[in-house]
Amino acid sequence: MMGRVKNLASLMRMRKEQGDEKLVLMLGAGASLSSGVPSTNTIMTELLAANDNDNTGGDVAQRFDQLWKRTPDATRRGFLTPYLERGATPSVGYQKLSELIKAGYFDVILSFNFDQLLDRSLQKAGVEYARVIRGETIESRMQQLVAAKTPRCKLVKPHGSLNSVDNYLFDSAEMLRYPEPIEALVREVTSRDIVICGYAFKDTCVLRAFADRGGSVFCVNPSGAPSALSVVLKDRLSEDNEIRTDFDTFFTALHQELLATGPVVDEKPPANPFKFLESYDEQDAAIFRERDDEIADFFIFLERKPPSQVIVISGPSKAGKTSLVRAGLLARLDAGKYLKVYVRCRTDVESQLPKELAARGLVPDGLDLPASLAALAASSADRRAVLFLDQFDRVTSPTKLLTKEGQKELSAFLRTRLFAGLPENLTLVLVVTDAGDVSLGATLMQECDRSDLRRGSVLCHSFDRQNVIKIIESLASTAGFEFDGRIIEDLADSFEKGRNADPKVRFTLAHVHAICHVLAGTKRVAFESYKGAFDQNLDALHQAINVVEFMNFAEDCDYPMSAWFRNMVKVPLRESKEGIAAFIKAHYEELLPVRDRVVAGSERNGKPVEVGAGR
């Protein structure tokens, strides 16, 4: 991936230095996913769930076409406005892109997105630009405005925007063909050298208008070029210009190539994005990868009208459910709409939960479980309370669920204690592991039905080999690390082989992160360094992750003790036994936990709960 980014950067640099025509940039919905804007399919599914309950025939696209056609313009705007609010903050990719535009590397940006993420980024960067928007600009003048010398930068939206929603293209009939002036404009700009990022290349109007002859085409997409675009790449001799990565990673890498100021004088290593025997947390949302589908599913259930009262998140052991909850869901919950509370369950959850809620100042002391849930909802009258109960499977055990008596015991607890009189203003999110022949997730869904509760289910699937490659490449590139490509392939192979291995020697994403974390002490990581760390530490990591389950042990401890445990485990992995004492002495400050960390999903009197390092 990095080699092709370097080649593209060289071309862009040459064009700028020689005063030649710049490359055009085309942006699709994939560019906005990491900023919180859902995919087009998710938007259609959610709008249908909220506004078209009578019509259940046909697929999503067909049903949405019918809904959109019969919807007045003002209502269309109301449909789309909430999605702008969910994507209010541009991601790091938009920040890097706006700086590249300011530096003169792109002049024309062709965007099919109704959001205003690029507008916000350009304005923040102080870039002067012209908006050439269908529905806001006279169609016959659009091509003339794009060709104008000033301002240099033009943002072109041939499908319209939220401000011109009466012209915004969405259903299939509207997408068949552009008006002639817009088609001519699209054909002209797409005949130039062009970078296409995050666009599925399925819109009929774009397929008709896109120039089949012209300059080079660069496709940036995590899963590679869409089938229709592959034909264009071949016709325009650009088959080697496929860059398999996401929007944020790509523009971070391109920014590094084009705007890096030279060698870094300070030899301190960059911030390490890889996790060492810990899950992702809320502050890691910007580097959390490969869970867009699960995140979208969760918000479908939470934002239904009325919302789900119980959402079950289930998946195999070590699939990354805790990371999904913290960095994927908690981080995206709008604090103005939701009171978010996160609790790691113990076996005594019935007494634990009321005490924890009281300790955080959310409910009065001395309440039982049903009363504490009622008090939590009452304390948040203007916001919906969302209570995440992670490790909820600890309230029972897989062995008990295999027996009729165990099933009755769990059913009674749920019916009489947890689900009893569940407040309307509260959503419980139960995070559980499905192990072997026992599906606790399915059992919980059945119990919701018996208690007549609105419920939803999110499956947190295990990653595959390609997911692992994308995660390593993305995190390394974002942080400025250069991993030898053989390292990434070898880790991905170990992960794939270990998926069905004996549980004691299973190679998980936690292993991948831990090894990359240890290696990332310098910017350039050689294959030889990796093999040494891998061979020496694999047995120790198997013991820590698969046997002792150190991650759960450490995260069950209060901060800063959890961070202290993890930091101490790093010592023998990085140093010889003879050098451990010297290492601790030399790196004592580094090993101490950072001060003032915010506890995930916790609020006290409306404010995040902070804890000191306890030095």
Image (tube, rainbow, N blue to C red):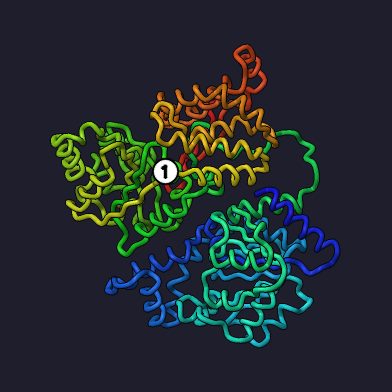
Name the spot of residue 125 as percent of width and height, x first.
Answer: 70, 61
Circle 1 SS class: loop
Classify residue 206 as left or right of residue 416: right
Query: Looking at the image, which residue is at 34% across and 62% down?
Result: 304
Q: Quadrant of residue 589?
A: top right
Q: Quadrant of residue 54?
A: bottom left
Q: Specify whether residue 335 is in view.
A: no
Name the residue that disc number 1 marks: 462
Between 598 and 9, which is closer to the camera in this rendering?
9
Classify residue 139 as left or right of residue 288: right
Between 325 and 496, which is closer to the camera in this rendering?
496
Query: Looking at the image, which residue is at 65% across and 49% down?
Result: 1
Query: Looking at the image, which residue is at 54% across and 70% down?
Result: 114
Residue pushed farthest top? 578
Q: From the image, which quarter does the C terminus lie in?
A: top right
Name the spot of residue 16 as percent of width and height, x first.
Answer: 81, 63
Three-letter amino acid code at disc 1? Answer: Ser
Residue 260 against residue 575 in the figure, above or below = below
Q: Quadrant of residue 220?
A: bottom right
Classify residue 449 as left or right of residue 557: left
CA neighbours of label 1 inside 10 A, class few (<14), some (14 to 19), many (20+)? some
Q: Specify whether residue 573 is in view.
A: yes
Name the spot of residue 472 as percent of width and height, x first.
Answer: 57, 42
Numbered marks: total: 1
Residue 64 against residue 556 in the figure, above or below = below
Name the spot of residue 603 as percent of width and height, x first.
Answer: 43, 45
